[in-house]
């Protein structure tokens, strides 16, 4: 009698799993084109798929590299001194097709990036996308908010969003942490983050 063992199934790559983000920069100054394009040209894209269209820039790859790219890009734009707003959408668990039915979660490390010395304000929302009877979306969302409190970036709650404040790197990493942590048990997770830098509304 012979027995056969099947080879272990390889974990999907970040690209196969649909790990990515979209970012739209708004620069409140007349030379916004130069600021945005200059930041895009100067930001390191190593190990990433990056594509810019008239609306946003897509960045695909592993979570750590995506966070590093977003911090670098928005930091470079803010270095202009202009009021800069970055609208970021994170997604993992769906490559982006019209029909998408992920069945397994993907574990990955929580991204961390060195602080860059730029104060940022942000509003953040997290969306675990699962129809499973065992899904508890609010449990996962509250756990992510508690994690933000532990990190020291939590700045209060408003309608539909959680306020974040701190170093730009910490703020983006906070949103990414919730996205990744929920993604360890929920196959498809998206998150939305709007970051403001150099705002004239801040004394």
Image (cartoon, rainbow, N blue to C red):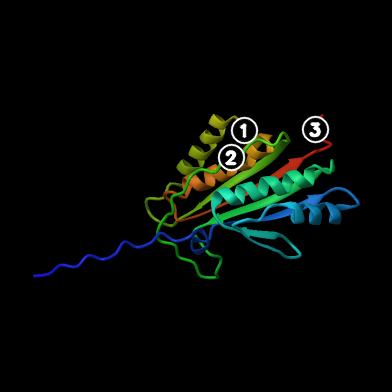
For the C terminus, the image quarter is top right
Distance in Å between CA atoms under marks 1 and 3 = 17 Å
- Which quarter of the figure is the N terminus placed in? bottom left
Q: Is residue 9 left or right of residue 197?
A: left
The x and y percentages for residue 61 are 56, 57
Judge left or right: residue 181 versus residue 115: left
Q: Which residue is mark 2?
A: 174
- Dot 3 surroundings within 10 Å: few (below 14), some, or many (20 or more)? few
Q: Report, in whole angstroms, how far the alpha carbon at label 2 lies from the one at label 3.
A: 21 Å
Residue drawn 76% across and 40% down?
197
Q: From the image, tell me which residue sits under label 1.
A: 153
Query: Mark 1 or mark 2: which comes first in sequence?
Result: 1
Which residue does the numbered mark 3 point to in the structure image? 202
Q: Mark 2–mark 3 contact, CB under 8 Å?
A: no
View extreme (right): residue: 30
Most distant residue in the left direction: 1
Label pair 1/2, CB-CB below 8 angstroms: yes
Nearer the viewer's eye, disc 2 or disc 3? 2
> Secondary structure beneath disc 1?
loop
Q: Residues within 10 Å of mark 2 (few under 14, many from 20)?
A: many
Residue 109, horizontal then vertical, whole percent: 48, 45
Lower sequence index among marks 1 and 3: 1
Instruction: Say what secondary structure mark 2 lies in.
Output: helix
Q: Are marks 1 and 3 in contact (CB under 8 Å)?
A: no
Res. 134 visible in picture? yes
Q: Earlier in the sequence, mark 2 or mark 3?
A: 2
Q: Nearer the viewer, residue 162 or 44?
A: 44
- Secondary element under disc 3, as helix, strand or loop, is loop
Q: Residue at x 37, y 50 (%)?
A: 134
Quarter of the view holding residue 111: top right
Q: Taking 182 as reference, is 120 above or below it?
A: above
Could you tell me residue 162's position as x and y percent? 62, 39
């Amino acid at each position: 009698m012979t027995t056969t063992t099947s080879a272990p199934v390889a974990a999907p790559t970040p690209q196969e799993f649909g790990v990515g983000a979209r970012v739209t920069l708004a620069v409140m100054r007349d030379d916004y084109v130069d600021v945005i394009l200059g930041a895009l040209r100067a930001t390191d894209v190593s190990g990433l798929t990056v594509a810019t269209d008239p609306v946003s820039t897509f960045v695909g790859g592993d979570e750590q590299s995506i966070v590093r790219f977003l911090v670098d890009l928005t930091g470079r734009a803010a270095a202009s001194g202009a009021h800069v707003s970055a609208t970021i959408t994170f997604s993992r668990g769906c490559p982006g097709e019209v029909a998408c039915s992920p069945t397994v979660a993907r574990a990955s490390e929580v991204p961390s990036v060195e602080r860059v010395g730029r104060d940022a304000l942000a509003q953040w929302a997290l969306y675990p996308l699962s129809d499973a009877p065992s899904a508890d979306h609010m449990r996962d969302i509250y756990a992510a908010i508690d994690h933000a409190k532990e990190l020291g970036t939590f700045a209060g709650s408003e309608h539909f969003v959680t306020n974040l404040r701190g170093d730009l790197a910490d703020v983006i990493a906070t949103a990414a942490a919730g996205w990744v942590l929920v993604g360890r048990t929920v196959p498809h997770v998206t998150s939305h983050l709007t970051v403001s830098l150099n705002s004239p509304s801040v004394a």
